[in-house]
Image (cartoon, grey):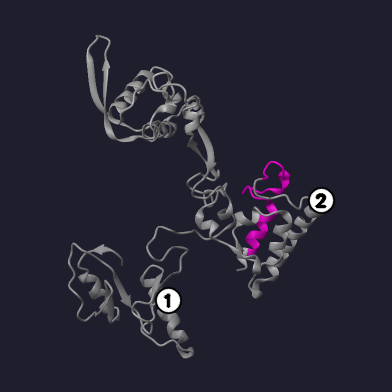
Amino acid sequence: MRTRKGEFVDLFEKLNTQGYSRVRVDGVVHPLTDPPKLKKQEKHDIEVVVDRLTVKPSAKQRLTESVETALSLADGIVVLEFVDHAHDAHNREQRFSEKLACPNGHALAVDDLEPRSFSFNSPYGACPECSGLGIRKEVDPDLVVPDPELTLAQGAVAPWSMGHAADYFTRMMAGLGEVMGFDVNTPWRKLPAKARKAILEGCDEQVHVRYRNRYGRTRSYYADFEGVMAFLQRKMQQTESDMMKERYEGFMRDVPCPVCQGTRLKPEILAVTLAAGDRGKKSIAEVCDLSISECADFLQHLTLDPVNKPSPGRCSRKSCRGSGSCSTSGWTTCRCHGLPRRWPAEKHNASGWPHRSVRAWWGALRSR
């Protein structure tokens, strides 16, 4: 139990009746016959000491049973403390999980690996940030201000220069100008860098906006200034109109997804690698980014478990034969990744990766 509030009197009694003799609370070991009195409003870490033993060949069965008991008690997590190491040694304690999840409490977990886990067309493998596209829309300042010779009053900020809201945004920028010391009749290129940054990215201070209504009376109010880039991103997310989306996208450009770096897959899937001797370890995205000849060479040198080597060998040989035929056809420099339009349609599967590449990858992965 980690970072939970309470006194846990009932828990200590239950563990004692189950036959356990020690418990570690907040890093300190206590006997269950005299458990500590905890403060109800403070968070505590409670761990059961299942066993203490010396590792030797004759203790293998006991060690196995102790680990299984600890896993069942702690929902698949076990902590091993090597008491012969120094107290400040980084490896004195090691935490393990029987699940594909971080045992240290971080929000990182992976489902059982399947072929669909390596597909960016499946929610099980697609990057959650870009939904498997590998790119995302980002506001481009050069498209927002296409003509730096224009003034703010003349419509230098293109998204705020059209429609009935143009006057509203001009008044907002005039209010910002009072705070930062610039005039809306100044050309964009002559504005101070600080002012241009505030117009694009927003300002923490509220601006005082003044205007004259249709009756000739002066009115004023204070408002937040979010900046044109945040404005476009917000409107893009909120609108349901295809026409408005197309308009907002006109001020954006495609950039690689910052999470998956354009590979389209979840970071935890990209962490799954295959080793090929001195050629290093590569993820499926890195393998598919190789040329055909480089991919064939990598698959031929996979480092596999000798017990399971025959099965992936057949899979690898089939892929290598396919890549070899491509090599003899002059496709040696062609890269799998980024060729969805040139590669024959029948050689792709539903994942979007070349069919043989995924099959070889999954066959080799299952053998590990």
Residue 324, percent across and down? 78, 57
Residue 194 forms part of the magenta stretch: no
Q: Amino acid at mark 2?
A: Ser
At 72% from the left and 42% from the top, the residue drawn is 342
Residue 218: image quadrant is top left
Examine the rendering and report whether any part of residue 94 can be seen. yes
At 74% from the left and 51% from the top, the residue drawn is 333
Reading the chain from its start, which is encountered first: label 1 or label 2?
A: 1
Q: Residue furthest right?
A: 328
Q: Amino acid at mark 1?
A: Glu
Examine the rendering and report whether any part of residue 315 can be seen. no
Q: Find out whether the residues at labels 1 and 2 contact each other: C-beta distance under 8 Å.
A: no
Kindly identify which residue carries mark 2: 329
Q: Quadrant of the N terminus?
A: bottom left
Nearest the camera: 8 or 316?
Answer: 316
Residue 24: image quadrant is bottom left
Residue 41, percent across and down? 18, 62
Tag 2's secondary structure? loop
Residue 196, percent across and down? 39, 32
Which callout, 1 or 2, points to the residue nearer the camera? Answer: 2
Mark on residue 277? none
Kindly identify which residue carries mark 1: 68
Which residues are the magenta region?
A: 339-364
Tag 1's secondary structure? helix
| Image: 18 above or below 77 | below
| Image: 115 above or below 244 | below
Horizontal relation, residue 29 to residue 336: left or right? left
Residue 241, percent across and down? 47, 26
